[in-house]
Image (cartoon, rainbow, N blue to C red):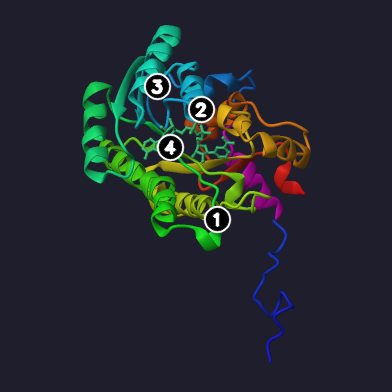
Amino acid sequence: MTDLNNNTAKGAVVPPPPSAADIAAANASIPDVPFEPKNFLAKFRLDGKVAVVTGGARGLGFSMAEGLCSVGLKGIAILDVQTDLGLDAIKKLHGAYGVQAQFYKVDVRDETAVNDIMDSIARDLGAIDIVVNSAGVADLVHAEEYPSEKFRRVIDINLNGSFLVTQAAAKHMIAQGRGGTIIFIASMSGSIVNWPQPQSAYNASKAAVKHLMKSLAAEWAVHRIRCNSISPGYMDTALNRSYTTLFNEWKDRTPLGRLGDPDELTGACIWLASESSAFCTGSDIVIDGGYTVL
Ligand SMILES: NC(=O)c1ccc[n+]([C@@H]2O[C@H](COP(=O)([O-])OP(=O)(O)OC[C@H]3O[C@@H](n4cnc5c(N)ncnc54)[C@H](O)[C@@H]3O)[C@@H](O)[C@H]2O)c1
């Protein structure tokens, strides 16, 4: 009977030590370049790139859109259902960063509209390089009372909507043949269950978003399309502040003792959008003040 705890039985192999000739050949294969200072920061720049940000009219999406604009974007498309906020967002981004900014009113669940808008973006702003999927909703309902249409709505926006936008953008990226980078805003709720509020649909949707991201990362690596996610913990947004009874509990349960500033996600977003993360795909970056370590 095979001993599965025995590495030898599983076929592990200890290679023979490299010979002096192998070591000399390996050393010779590394190009002898003069040692000079490198500009690592330059790899974070996004000069000439075009980004699409869903849910970018406000909140975390707007904050990440601003971060991308601050490092040289050529164009940004804000996709959202809220027209007034969307128009205000592009005015601010163009005014502050000089970037070409367009707002497109769309519900991310609407496949036809999403595909049409992606064509418009490519025409209006140029080839799409970056997508940030931030459009999302949550509701707090006890599972035994959750109306099925409400449960479906959360999954439909957070999961299916992210897929439809990503698929539409990826078709362009594949046709362009120059790769791209896609960032999903998941949540720590995709790996832990938030407490004490009941949010089963939201938690399930975010776990699914993370696994969708990994699946697409595997499929589209061949097209040089990188897919990653950011999983925020509790962020200090107006909506979260409005939950006055929960706010302090969330703060107390977070090891850093506070909620996160939306701008504290921006560095990771810029990194994932840029060449500085060129070897990173299929990864989830948790930014939660330590919440999920406990
Ligand atoms: N705020 C947090 O503490 C927190 C924590 C973890 C993850 N997240 C995630 O970050 C993302 C942004 O959250 P936020 O706090 O900025 O929320 P928010 O409500 O401030 O912003 C979400 C935006 O998405 C838009 N939107 C909603 N449904 C849409 C649809 N069907 N089609 C197009 N646009 C739609 C809204 O109009 C809004 O502008 C969400 O995916 C959320 O789940 C937030």
Residue at numbered disc 1 = 200
Q: The N terminus lies in which quarter of the figure?
A: bottom right
Disc 2 CB within 8 Å of nearest ligand 1 atom = yes
The rendered magenta stretch, by its main secondary structure, is classed as helix
Residue at numbered disc 4 = 135
Q: Position of residue 81 (x, y in %)?
A: 34, 32
Q: CA distance from mark 3 to mark 4?
A: 13 Å
- Judge by depth and name the residue closer to the eye, 199 or 166: 199
Q: CA distance from mark 3 to mark 1?
A: 29 Å
Residue at numbered disc 2 = 59
Q: Secondary structure at mark 2?
A: helix
User: As shown in the figure, which amino acid type bears the numbered disc 3?
Assistant: Leu
The residue at 24%/40% (across/down) is 115
The residue at 45%/42% (across/down) is 226
- The residue carrying pointer 2 sits among few (fewer than 14), some (14 to 19) or many (20 or more) residues within 10 Å by Cα, namely some
Q: Nearer the viewer, mark 1 or mark 4?
A: 1
Find the magenta span and give its range: 19-32
